[in-house]
Amino acid sequence: MSAADWIVLVVTLVGIILYGVWKSRGQRDMQGYFLDNQSMPWYIVLLSIIGTQASAVTFLSAPGQAYTDGMRFVQYYFGLPLAMVVLCITFVPIFHKLKVYTAYEYLEQRFDLKTRTLTSGLFLLQRALSTGISIYAPSIILSSLMGWNIYLTNIIMGGLLIIYTVSGGTRAVSYTQTFQLVIIFSAMFLAGWMVVHLLPENVGFIDALQVSGKMNKLNVIVTDFDWKDRYNIWSGLIGGFFLALSYFGTDQSQVGRYLTARSVTESRLGLLMNGLVKVPMQFLILLIGALVFVFYLYFRAPVFFNEAQIKKVYKSEQGTAFKAVESEYNRLATVKQAQVAEMAAAIKKGDEAAIASGKAALQKTESAAEETRTKAIGLIKKADPAADTNDTNYIFLHFVVNNLPKGLVGLLIAIIFLAAWGSIAAALNSLASTTVIDIYQRMYKKEETDGHYLQVSRWWTVAWGLFCIVVAQFASQLGSLIEAVNILGSLFYGVILGIFLVAFYCKRIGGTATFWAAVVSELGVIVIYLWNIVSFLWLNAIGCFLVIGIAAIFQLIMGDENKRLEKTA
């Protein structure tokens, strides 16, 4: 990066940190540290909810996801608006009425301590693992730009985030997320505009969309039903609904956002607006990836987008063979440039025969290029068996660093850091609050001062931050980060949601039946995933219904057993 980029990057990040510290001044108790004394207006709640969900993974990996698999990932969010309506009717008024710090406090009042502890434990495990992946995302940037060791970069990035979160609390997280999102949306708009601006003079936005569509990158709606297809309208509406209901209704990183609102109405407004904003927001982020794909049809793409990894291969025994494969890939890229120009001209003329012919030729060359790329990846693996051979997360970063003007590169890099800091800070905050409220205070130190709990909360923030850094060290093996985070959530969210739905609507089912139903259901979900029976989005619905069904059966058995014992007595 240029000196101007570094100045923009440093000034933006330092400005955000100082703003957060200024906003968080005066926090002296748990109510202020975790809930900001429930003083947030709805629009701050909305932006905090979006900022918590839209991590660096969203802005770094989503464009790459669209580049490789098209825009069908957006269907993952189709169930979210309906989930927001359900949450506003059921979850929000209950949590506000009970004046809880965490969602899991309610479960002890409804069931018992073991069910509360199990549910909070499932949340802590899932959220800590996901946060580790989120720490890895911005580390990719520094590692790629500076050539730093990724493991050392994870430690540096995680350490900065721990300091940022410990010093601020919920108020710093919420208000800095608001400021961050303004910068993020502005920068992403500029990035999208630059993709189109950098295309050849005779290729405009509509032309780029038409080419992208012909290459199957605008596959926003997929109506074919397939249990194993990760992204279609059915898995998005049904599986996505249950995932969103669980994430926003039972995940403390989100519940903690809308519990800071001034009232039930303010919480509801924030959630409902999130339902309206999230789908178009994700659509536009994915659209940037589809446009970047078109850009790399007109201009040569690298055989592998992680350039730091390529430099390592050059220096290895596989260097000569890799350069030969790279040369073949570049030759095919030249062929594609001519073919895409011919197809675009045919599209403008409306010549359907020429369009079909051009599309077939371009797809054939693209297929040959992918085969060549596979050979290159094989050589990378030979040169470095520990290498991350999935470069989906590097695609958008490569475009930004190599094609945008000075200053704007620094701004785009800054927004990925900002997104990471906002979501990870919220996650660490929720991990600390759940640990202190649901475990430490409830089971170990019940009668301490607020000052004591505040101090312990800061230490638990540090502890969870260190754990997440350890997780980040293994994240390079997970492929597309945005998929990895959502798969991980789907392994737990359905079961957690099922526990809450039993609590809300199945009044005759007790804590013991629910507890064992949750244990059995979680094991069942993991087995279903490992056996690859259905795509991961369906796990949310399956886990939820398993808990409800098994809990009802266990309660019938336990009820009958109780009656038999009473008669015997």
Image (cartoon, grey):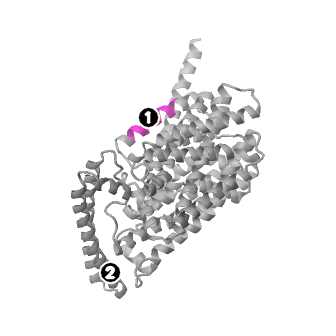
Near mark 1 (Cα within 10 A), the count class, few <14, some 14-19 or many ≥20, is few
**Residue 248 x, y percent position in the rendering:** 59, 49
**Residue 503 x, y percent position in the rendering:** 61, 38
Q: Secondary structure at mark 2?
A: helix
**Residue 106 x, y percent position in the rendering:** 66, 37
Give the number of marks: 2
The relative height of residue 87 versus residue 465 in the rendered view (above or below) is: below
Instruction: Report the Cα–Cα distance between label 1 and label 2.
Output: 53 Å
Is 280 magenta? The answer is: no
**Residue 508 x, y percent position in the rendering:** 61, 33
Q: Is residue 528 left or right of residue 169?
A: left
Instruction: Name which residue type carries label 2.
Output: Ala
Q: Quadrant of residue 206?
A: bottom left
Mark found first going from the N terminus, 1 or 2: 2
Q: Decide which of 190, 398 is in the foreground and name it.
A: 398
Residue visible at 66% across and 38% down in the picture: 458
Closest to the camera, between mark 1 and mark 2, is: 2
> In the rendered structure, which segment of residues is drawn in magenta?
516-528
Q: Decide which of 319, 180 is in the foreground and name it.
A: 319
* Disc 2: which residue: 341
Near mark 2 (Cα within 10 A), the count class, few <14, some 14-19 or many ≥20, is some
* Disc 1: which residue: 523
Magenta segment, prevailing SS (helix, strand or loop): helix
Instruction: Name which residue type carries label 1.
Output: Leu
The relative height of residue 117 versus residue 409 in the rendered view (above or below) is: above
Residue visible at 22% across and 58% down in the picture: 320
Q: Decide which of 389, 563 is in the foreground and name it.
A: 389
Q: In the displayed image of the protein, which residue is found farthest to the front?
A: 3
Q: Quadrant of residue 302?
A: bottom left
Q: Secondary structure at mark 1?
A: helix
